[in-house]
Image (tube, rainbow, N blue to C red):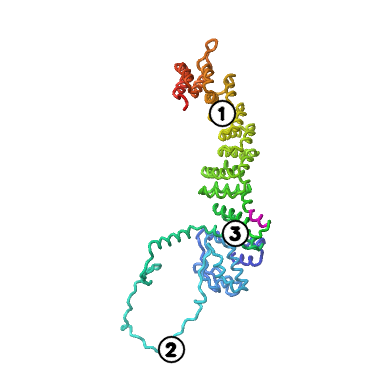
């Protein structure tokens, strides 16, 4: 099968069915062998191939088509095929043998071609014909005429100490009167360390781009662009994100200072960063980062994202919510924040895009970065149909906390989502947005909280207590201690919330109102009063 595959390789093109069938049959013939051993060792003679002393190929004619003679004539004496050689390097071996059979070039000897291939699964043993093929020295006449020496009179030579293989004796070296100083030894150590730690890939990138800048020949520049294109793919596959960032940065520098650079050449050079910023390519990269066993360094991701085009920000936002590795997600958020801070206009644009995940992440980034430019767009998203987007917009506006942002929040006080309303009132309480006081007060006076749950009631009264000051004490005191026409008090939850608001006011009048209710029979009210009394006046 091996010999047939060689002949098919010589006669047919790679896409020919006959060639493909011969190759598949040859590969399949190895399968039974690997069930018993991990390597196949063939001894090569001029007319035979032997396996453990048994002849498996016998071709007595020493012609160019005879496989044993093809291997033997250039010095090959043993061919060793390791497991999976037929899958990994079989075609390469076929090409070598076919090239030797064609001949026509003195450099096309078998050993040279095998050496150039650097096979990992195919090994071989050979002899140097320039040495092993020399005739033995003949005995001279002088030597024939010498008398034989009596062995009894011969003294044994002194025995030498034979060192094990690989051990060097200091006696083989000449001694010197001088030795290296300690600082010289340290200098050598540091030089060796720097040499081993240096990134050869970055050196290659720098050398290629230096050539690109200095050589104005279009053919040379096109070839370098092709090499950089392949190198970029290899670096991404190897996970060398820092080197990829260096390549993209240096490409931009070369495009700006190269001499006599045609517009189409510059466009092709910058196309590297453009292609990596496309959603499909960047998505594959982010997915591989998420699936990688070891996380990258944060600085590597920062450097890479800094070289991407601004349109890559949307794809990064989309993938922050998709990644499964929590550490990778944190790294992506940090790197995305750096990219977004350098491209505020793109961040603001992404808030209004139709893609929900991108818009949601852009809203969160705008809030985390406290971006005032996003206030107007965030105000528009307060009418979005998605509750989560409206809630995220409220939180972002509360983080930005400019007067314009707080004014936008007033639109969401009547939102149909309870979570949104609670977030708005808590933001007013935290930021003490007094322009919203009248609306908060009307909600309390007009009994709009009757159907609300305790969390919302507490949020509204906390906001009122934070903003009303002494002017709000009479209203709160009436809700806590007042009675109706028939001696009926307010709802227990409303009274407890009023006590909490009085504690937030903290004035003397508020404390007096709380003390009047300290013995209330409702435990919820009594606990709220005690908490308000312990709080005291605000600092």
Tell me where residue 3 appears, x and y as whole percent: 60, 67
Residue furthest top in the image? 486
Q: Which numbered tag is attached to residue 141?
A: 2
- What residue is rendered at 48% in x and 57% in y? 197
| Residue 180 placement, left or right of 254 | left
Which label lies toward us, 1 or 2?
1
Instruction: Identify the residue at image location x=45%, y=18%.
Output: 515
- Report the magenta residues as a range: 264-271
In the drawing, does residue 514 fall left or right of residue 226?
Answer: left
Distance (Cα) linking label 1 and label 3: 57 Å
Residue 293: in sight, yes or no? no
Pinpoint residue 111: horizontal percent, then vertical percent. 55, 70
Say which element carries label 1.
Answer: loop
Which mark sits nearer the N-terminus, 1 or 2?
2
The reply to whether the magenta stretch includes residue 325 is no
* Residue annotated with mark 1: 433
Dividing the image into 4 quarters, which one contains the N terminus?
A: bottom right
Q: CA distance from mark 1 to mark 2?
A: 120 Å
What residue is shown with label 3? 209
Q: Which mark is residue 162?
A: none
Image height of 181 relative to 432, above or below? below
Residues packed near mark 3 inside 10 Å, few (<14), some (14 to 19) or many (20 plus): many
Q: Name the dominant secondary structure of the magenta segment.
A: helix
């Amino acid at each position: 099968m091996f010999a047939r595959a060689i002949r098919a390789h010589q006669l047919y093109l790679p896409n020919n069915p006959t060639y493909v069938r011969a190759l598949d049959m040859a590969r399949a013939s190895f399968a039974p062998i690997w069930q018993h051993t991990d390597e196949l060792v063939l001894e090569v003679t001029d007319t035979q191939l032997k396996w453990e002393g048994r002849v498996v190929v016998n071709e007595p004619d020493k012609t160019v088509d005879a496989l044993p003679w093809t291997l033997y004539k250039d010095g090959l004496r043993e061919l060793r095929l390791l497991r999976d050689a037929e899958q990994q390097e079989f075609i390469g071996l076929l090409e070598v043998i076919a090239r030797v059979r064609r001949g026509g070039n003195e450099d096309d000897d078998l050993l040279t071609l095998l050496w150039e291939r650097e096979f990992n699964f195919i090994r071989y043993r050979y002899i140097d014909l320039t040495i092993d093929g020399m005739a033995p020295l003949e005995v001279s006449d002088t030597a024939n005429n010498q008398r034989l020496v009596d062995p009894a009179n011969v003294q044994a030579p002194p025995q030498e100490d034979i060192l094990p293989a690989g051990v060097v004796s200091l006696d083989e070296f000449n001694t010197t009167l001088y030795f290296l100083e300690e600082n010289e030894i340290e200098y050598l150590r540091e030089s060796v360390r720097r040499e081993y730690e240096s990134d050869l890939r970055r050196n290659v990138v720098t050398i290629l781009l230096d050539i690109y800048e200095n050589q104005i020949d279009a053919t040379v520049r096109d070839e370098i662009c092709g090499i950089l294109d392949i190198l970029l793919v290899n670096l991404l596959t190897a996970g060398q994100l820092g080197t990829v960032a260096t390549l993209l940065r240096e490409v931009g520098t070369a495009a700006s200072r190269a001499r006599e650079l045609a517009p189409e050449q510059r466009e092709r050079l910058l196309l590297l960063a453009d292609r990596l910023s496309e959603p499909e390519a960047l998505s594959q990269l982010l997915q591989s980062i998420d699936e990688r066993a070891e996380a990258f360094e944060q600085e590597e991701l920062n450097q890479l994202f800094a070289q991407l085009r601004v349109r890559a920000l949307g794809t990064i936002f989309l993938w922050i919510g998709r990644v499964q590795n929590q550490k990778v997600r944190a790294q992506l958020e940090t790197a995305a924040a750096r990219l977004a801070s350098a491209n505020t206009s793109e961040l603001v644009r992404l808030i209004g895009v139709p893609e929900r995940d991108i818009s949601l992440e852009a809203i969160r980034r705008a809030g985390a970065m406290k971006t005032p430019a996003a206030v107007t767009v965030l105000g528009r998203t307060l009418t979005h149909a998605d509750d989560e987007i409206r809630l995220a917009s409220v939180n972002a506006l509360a983080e930005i906390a400019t007067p314009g942002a707080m004014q936008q929040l007033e639109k969401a006080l009547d939102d149909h989502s309870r979570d949104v309303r609670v977030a708005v009132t808590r933001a007013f309480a935290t930021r003490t947005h007094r322009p919203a006081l009248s609306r908060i007060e009307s909600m309390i006076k007009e009994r709009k909280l009757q159907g609300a749950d305790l969390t919302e009631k507490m949020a509204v009264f906390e906001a009122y207590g934070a903003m009303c000051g002494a002017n709000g004490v009479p209203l709160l005191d009436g809700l806590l201690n007042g009675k109706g026409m028939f001696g009926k008090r307010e709802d227990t939850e409303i009274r407890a919330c009023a006590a909490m608001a009085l504690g937030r006011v903290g004035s003397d009048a508020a404390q007096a109102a709380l003390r009047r209710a300290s013995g209330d029979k409702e435990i919820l009210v009594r606990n709220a009063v005690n908490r308000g009394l312990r709080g005291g006046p605000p600092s």
